Amino acid sequence: MSALLVALGAALGAPLRYLADRAVQARHDGTFPWGTFAVNTAGSALFGLLLALPADGWVTALAGTGFCGALTTYSTFAYETVRLAETGERPRALLNVVASVVGGLGAAWCGTLLAQALS
């Protein structure tokens, strides 16, 4: 049952990631991967919120592992970072790494704080 819930959440999260990524990136010139940064940060905040709220296991499987897991994308982050470095944009590649790690952790922390305030 959990695998089905994860798959259902992923079926919703993956297309949303693609659409949100393209929408954000279309509004920014340049090579910095703003779309991936935005979905990864938003997904981290949501996952932090979900994990800090009291919930049944099915909610974590559906919304956490499935939806947030598909919404966020480590592989695209890695690819875009390597692409930046290979094309001579090492400062942007480094900025992407630092901003993504700090932003993701900070967003998850803010999500947990929001959950605590709501509980």
Image: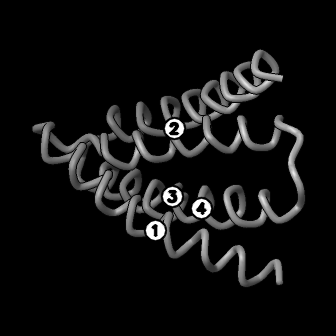
Kind of residue sitting beneath label 4: Phe
CA separation, marks 2 and 3? 10 Å
Are the residues at dot 4 and dot 3 in contact (C-beta closer than 8 Å)?
yes
The residues tagged by marks 4 and 1 sit, at their Cα atoms, a distance apart of 8 Å
Q: In the picture shown, does residue 95 fall above or below 22?
A: above
- Which residue is label 4 attached to? 67
| Labels 4, 3: front one | 4
**Structural distance between the alpha carbons of marks 4 and 2:** 14 Å
> What is the three-letter code of the residue carrying label 2?
Thr
Q: Which mark is residue 14?
A: 1
First along the sequence among labels 2 and 3: 2
Left or right position of 14 against 4? left
Q: Residue at x 77, y 15 (%)?
A: 117
Dot 4 lies on which element?
helix
Checking the image for residue 41, the label placed there is 2
- Residue type of the residue flagged with mark 1: Ala
